[in-house]
Amino acid sequence: MEVILLERIPNLGMVGDLVRVKPGFARNYLFPQYKAIKNNPANREIFEERKFELEARDLERRDEAAAIARHLQDREFVVIRSASDTGSLYGSVSKKDIAQAASEQKLSVSKEQLDLERPIKQLGSHAIQVLLHPEVAATIYVIVARTMMEAEEFKRPVETEAADEDDTAAVEPESEVFP
């Protein structure tokens, strides 16, 4: 089935592209969410009339997503779970758990925006991509620990890394001096 895209969709196309998709994908996802319309002469005419409006709306969404990304970038969210002595969780941390941890900090991140291939099953700090727009993403860090004290150990020491780099630059190699 050929459809005209009304917004940019990753791995599919840009606004206005004519793409061939499976009928079920179009019926169950693209059409209900107003992401595409069926390709026919009447719809092509409607699209041409609304093309600039749709492109402007896409730019607005991208700008809004960029602002949110700047706010979210490098944020840390702590999730407390039970784990074995080897660091394996007895359960797992899913997209839902991460979205809930973000909402506890009064940030709006939906589980559909999280790029998590499989649930987290180990203690530690895990980098997760938040896909806010097809062109905008932010990286957040999910710290999975047994206690808040343990979570502090997993946090990234940002200030100390910068200080270590300055210390190494300040040390000059010793030169041999002959008497």
Image (cartoon, rainbow, N blue to C red):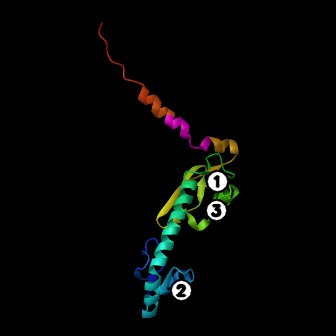
Q: Is residue 1 above or below residue 82?
A: below
Residue 92 quadrant: bottom right
Mark number for residue 27? 2
Distance between the Cα atoms at labels 1 and 3? 26 Å
Q: Is residue 57 above or below residue 37?
A: above
* Prevalent SS, magenta region: helix
Give the residue type at disc 3: Ser
Q: Which circle's residue, 2 or 3, is located before the other in the chain?
A: 2
Q: Residue 5, image x and y in percent?
A: 46, 80
Residue at left offset 51%, top offset 73%: 57
Q: Which residue is mark 3?
A: 108
Q: Which circle's residue, 2 or 1, is located before the other in the chain?
A: 2
- Would you say 81 lies left or right of 112 here? right
Crowding at dot 2, Cα within 10 Å, few <14 / some 14-19 / many 20+, comes out as some
- Would you say 108 lies left or right of 171 here? right
Give the residue type at disc 2: Arg
Between 116 and 141, the residue placed more toward the observer is 141
Q: Is residue 131 visible?
A: no
